Image (spheres, grey):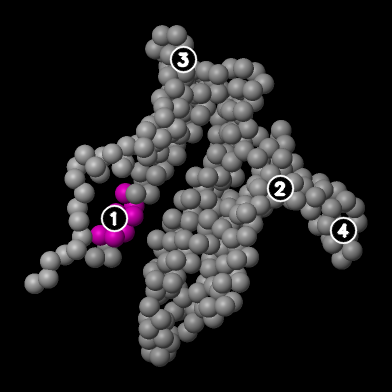
Amino acid sequence: MAQSDRRSLSGPLSFGLVLPLLIIFLFVFCWPIIKLLGVSLFDPAFTLDHYREVLGNDFTQVIFLRTFRVSLLVAALALLIGYPIANLMRSSPPFWAMVIGACVLIPLWTSVLVRSFAWTVLLQRNGAVNAILQSLGITNAPLSLLYNEIAVIVAQAHVMLPFMVMPIYQSLRAIPDELPRAGLSLGASNLAVFWHIILPLSRPGVLAGFLMVFVVSLGAFVTPALIGGPSSMMLATAISTEITEKFNWARGATLSALLLIAVAVLLLIFSRFMQLNKLEQK
């Protein structure tokens, strides 16, 4: 039997290679979070007053509910738009799949700030959307399309669309072509094949994309600040206001900690759900 040519690294050498990454992780990620929790819990002694005040404040509760509602709707809209795009990429020839993928991914090369400003141009009173609506006779006067939750949902869904399309596309690519063909050959309709074969097998990608878009939208700052305005303030904007305008670091840190805890809980639930899903498939 031929011996393997692979060489295993010694323990100290492996640790030395991983050490730079570990240092970066500790000082760039862990240490700021520890400091954040410390500011929210120690003022200067240990106290939970900041959490009681934030959780008991009606205005803060409205912001939390709005943030979760808008993020959920953003993920749902991105799923409705992204799934057909991913399915079209899967069923297209390689060249056209590459073109569609490029159209999805190229906006990632553009700053979120630029894309958000583009939506303000489109949705303003003398923008392209109002001009089209008036030219078609749908409206007689310009509509107020900016600075509301609907505008935030549409613009944020556009920003998050690549993060929805690519996980779904990878799940669809993993489905063997023989399975849909077998369903069609046995007399099933295209809708039945999609509902009973393609959609269940693509569920991991759907869940991963939905969770990614939802979690990232929870902490979105640029798009809600530019498109939503004060009447549609979300949690990231509220945190920025507390720290940069009111200089209330304790309250800003408390809001950030609560958002971090909520995201951690969602990730744990998703991880547990995926484990159960794998057990069911086995």
For image coordinates 63% across by 32% down, the residue present is: 237
Task: Locate residue 138: give its quadrant.
Answer: bottom right
Give the residue type at disc 4. Ala
- At label 4, counting other C-alpha atoms closer than 10 Å, the crowd grade (few under 14, some 14-19, many 20 or more) is some
Give SS at disc 2: helix
Magenta region? 272-279
7 lies above or below 201:
above
89 lies above or below 239:
below
Residue position marked by numbered label 3 in the rendering: 49
Give the residue type at disc 2. Val
Residue position marked by numbered label 1 in the rendering: 276
Residue position marked by numbered label 2 in the rendering: 114
Of the numbered discs 3 and 2, the one sitting upstream in the chain is 3
Magenta residue check for 278: yes
* Residue 110 pos. (x, y %): 66, 52
Give the residue type at disc 1. Leu
